[in-house]
Amino acid sequence: MKKLRVGIVGSSFGGLVHAPSFTAQGSFDVVALASPTRADEVAKARKIPHAFASLDAMLAGVELDVLSIASPPFAHRDHVLAGLARGLHILCEKPFALDVAQAQEMLDASARAGTVCALAHEFRYTPSRIAIRELIANDHLGALRAMEVAWYGNMLRAEVERPNSWWFARERGGGLTGAILSHLIDTATWLARRPPVRATGYERTANPNRTAGGVGFTSDVADGAFATIDYGEGLIATVTADGTRAIASSTLAVHGATRTAVASGPDLLDVTTFVVDDEETSELELKIQAHNHLRAAHPNIPPFVTLLDAFADAIAGKPADLPTFADGLATQRVLAAIGYEAPVGSVSKQ
C-alpha cells in the first residue's frame, strides 16, 4: 500500500515528536518540513528530503496527502485553512486556536473539505486513560458524579529560567492554559463522552517577572489555570494545571456512584492506576503502552504513534476514535470561559 505523504510545519515539537512518530507508525512518509528558523537543520537530522522556510513554499514545492501542524498557536488557523484549501488531511497541535471564532472557522472549513482532521491529544492513548474509559463504558464505576484532572509542575517557578519567546506572550497563544490545560480538558470531555454544558474558572500569573540568560522580561500568560466544568446529568469536573508547584505530579480521579478510579504519579505518562470502593483498593495491571519501544527517543512518541494508528485508520475509512476539531471547539469554549479569551458560544462563564 502506498504511504501517505506528510509535510510538517514547525521544527521544535514537530522535529522532536511529529517526525519520528509519523516515520515509526508505518503508514506515512515524511517528505517535507517547513520552518522559518531551523528547517534545513531538522530536516537533515530527521532524514526528511525537503526543507522549506514557510508553509506556503512547502505547499507549492511538494505534493502532500497530510499536513501535520506543530507551529505555535498563533499560526494554527492560517496553517489549517491553507492545508484544507489543498484538500489535505490535517493533524493539528493544541491549543487548537487563539479563540472560539477561529476554532469554529476551522471546524466549518474541515466539514467543507471532507478530509480527516484531528488534534494532537496523544495523552488519550495511554494505558491508564484507556483503562479508565473502559471502566466507565462497562458501568464499573456507576453513574459518574465527579472528575479531578490535575497536572502540577515546577517549570514556571520564579527561579526557573526559560527562554523568552512567544510562549510568554498571551496574544500569541502562550502560557500553561493552552499548553497543558487544553490536554486535561480534552481528557475530561473524552471520559464524560459528551460536551460541556457550562464552565467557570480562572487563570493566574504568579511569576510575571522572569529572567533568561541574565536578561529580565515580563510574562503576561498564565502559570496556573483552574476550571470547573459542568457536563450535565450530575457530573462535574475540576481541572487544574499549575507550573509553580514544589513537587511535580499528575492525578486523574473519576468518581462514580459505586467506585472511584484513580491514576496518579509524577507526570502524565508515569502513573499507577487503582480502583477504589468502600471495601478495598485494587491496583490495576495494565497493558504496556503501545509502541513502548520508542520511548527512549521521547516519552511522548509511544502515545503519539498510537494516535497516528487511529489517524491512519480514519483516513483508510476504518472506525477510529480520534480527537476531532469539534472536540477542539468544545475545549476552546472552556478555555474562553476561564479567561483565555472572551467567552463565546454555548459554554458560559458563571
Image (spheres, rainbow, N blue to C red):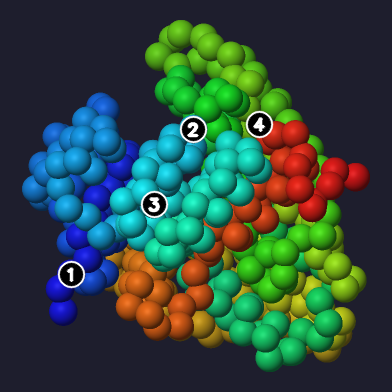
Left or right of 17: which side holds 111? right
Q: On the image, numbered disc 4 is attached to which residue?
A: 222
At x 72%, y 41%, the residue is: 336
Report how far apart the C-alphas of labels 2 and 4 lie in the structure: 16 Å
The label nearer to you, 2 versus 4, is 2
| Circle 3 residue | 84
Residue at mark 1 to residue at mark 4: CA–CA distance = 41 Å
Q: Amino acid at mark 3?
A: Leu
Which circle, 1 or 4, is nearer the viewer? 1
**Image marks 2 and 3: residues in contact by CB distance under 8 Å:** no
Q: Earlier in the sequence, mark 2 or mark 1?
A: 1
Q: Residues within 10 Å of mark 1 (few under 14, many from 20)?
A: few
Q: Outermost residue toward the top?
A: 215
Mark 3, secondary structure of its residue: helix
Q: Nearer the viewer, residue 273 or 23?
A: 23
Read off the residue under disc 1.
Answer: 3
